Image (spheres, helix red, strand yellow):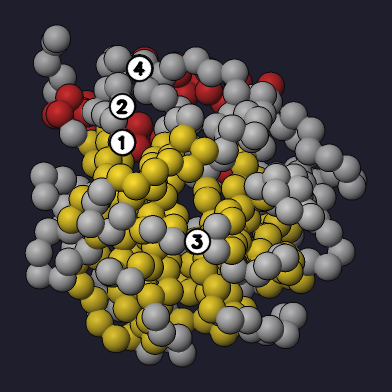
Amino acid sequence: MRRVPVFLSGAIVVVALGWILRPVPGGAPRRAGPGTLAATVVAPAIPAEAVSYADVLDIADADVLGDRWFLLDRRASRVHVLGPKPGSLVSFGRSGIGPGELTRPGALVLHGDTVVVVERLGGVLHRFNTAGRHLGDRRFEVGGCRVPVVSDAVSTPAGLVFLVTCPGVRLNTRAFAALERPGYDARVLASTAARPSPFEGIDPHFTPVLATHRDGIVFGAAGDECLSVMTLSGARSGVYCAGWLERLPLPEGDHEQLARLRVRMAAFGAHLKATDALPPFDGLFPVGPAAYAFRTPTRLGGASRQLHFAPTGPDRGARLPVARYAFAGRGTALLGWESAGGIRIARYDLPD
C-alpha cells in the first residue's frame, strides 16, 4: 500500500473519528407546523409540556439521581442540574484547561454521590460533588491506545467503565469497554472487532454502545445482531439481542450529506461505504432490573432520535416523541428540542 504523509493521515483520522464517533448536528433545524418528521426539512414537533431553558445550549450526555437530572452541556462547557420543579436550573463548571475546567467534555456519569465529567480526548476525569464543588481531576490510560477517545461512561460496583475508541494499526478503529483502575492502565473488559481502515471503507454507522447490566455490562456495536453481556472480570456471560427493532431508511437529504462527505474523504484517498438505512439504535439505557430503553436515530448524525422500549409487559412497543436529545434512567426519561429561545426540555415518567 502506498505511504500516506503524516499530515494526511492525521486529517483522515480527524475526519473519520469526527464522523463515526461524534453526533454532529446538521445545522439549525428549520421549523414547521406540528406533524411527523419529514425527510430533512421538518424538525420534530415540540410538545406543549416542554419547558424552555435559555442557558442550556446543548445536551451531550445526561444522568439522573432521584428527581434531579444532570446535563452535560458541551457547547457551554458546563453541567446543568434540573430540579424537580419545572424551570429550576443551577449550573457549575466552566471552559478552560485548569483544575476542574472543561476543555472538550464527552461524557457525564454519576458515581455514587460524585459527578464525573470525562474529557473526550485523553482520558481526563473531572470530579465534582452533586452541589458542583470541584473534588479533583485524574487521568486514566488504556494500554496500547495513544489517544483514547471517550464517548460514554457507566458506574458499576467495581468502578467506572468507559466506552473508548482507539485508532489502531493502519487507522483501523476499535471500541473498548475499559474498567478504570486508579494508578494502573484501565482493564479492557471487551472490544469490538477492528473496523476497516479509511482506505478499505469506513462504516458511517459504526456506533459502539455501553450500558450497565445486572451481571456487569452490555457492550458492542449497535449494527451487530446482538450485544455481549460481560462480567466485571471480563468474562462473557451471555448476549442481549434486540431483533424487534427495525432500521429506518436513510432520509433523502441524508443521502446527499453522505455523498458530499464521500467526496471529501476521497480527496484523502479514503472510502466511505454506501448505506441506505440508519443504525437500529445509538444508545441503550437501563430503566428497570432487566429492561432497557433503546435510542433510535431518525436522522443522520443524531439530528433527531426516539426512545423505544422492549416489547414486553403492558407497554409493549411503547415509544416517546421524536426529539433532538433523548436520555432515560430508572423510572424517568428526558427529551430535549432546539428552539429559538434555547433548549426546551420535557420529562416523562416510565413504568417500573
Which amino acid, by three-letter code, is at mark 1? Answer: Thr
Q: Which of marks 2 and 4 is in front?
A: 2
Mark before the other along the chain sequence, 2 or 4: 2
Mark before the other along the chain sequence, 3 or 4: 3
**Left or right, 342 with reference to 237:** right
Residue 181 lies in what quarter of the image?
bottom left
Name the residue that disc number 2 marks. Answer: 195
Name the residue that disc number 1 marks. Answer: 192
Q: Nearer the viewer, mark 3 or mark 2?
A: 2
The answer to whether residue 197 is above or below residue 36 is above
Point 57% across, 38% down: residue: 242
Q: What secondary structure is marked by label 3? A: strand
Q: What secondary structure is marked by label 2? A: loop
Q: Is residue 240 visible?
A: yes
Check whether the beta carbons of the residues at disc 2 and disc 4 lie within 8 A of each other.
Answer: no
Mark before the other along the chain sequence, 1 or 3: 3
**Left or right, 15 with reference to 131:** left
Q: What secondary structure is marked by label 1? A: loop
Name the residue that disc number 4 marks. Answer: 201
The mark found on residue 124 in the picture is none
Q: What secondary structure is marked by label 4? A: loop
Q: Nearer the viewer, mark 1 or mark 2?
A: 1
The answer to whether residue 3 is above or below residue 335 is above
C-alpha distance separating marks 1 and 3: 23 Å
Q: How crowded is mark 1: few (under 14 residues within 10 Å), some or many (20 or more)?
A: some
Check whether the beta carbons of the residues at disc 1 and disc 2 lie within 8 A of each other.
Answer: yes
Which amino acid, by three-letter code, is at mark 3? Answer: Asp
**Left or right, 1 with reference to 156:** left
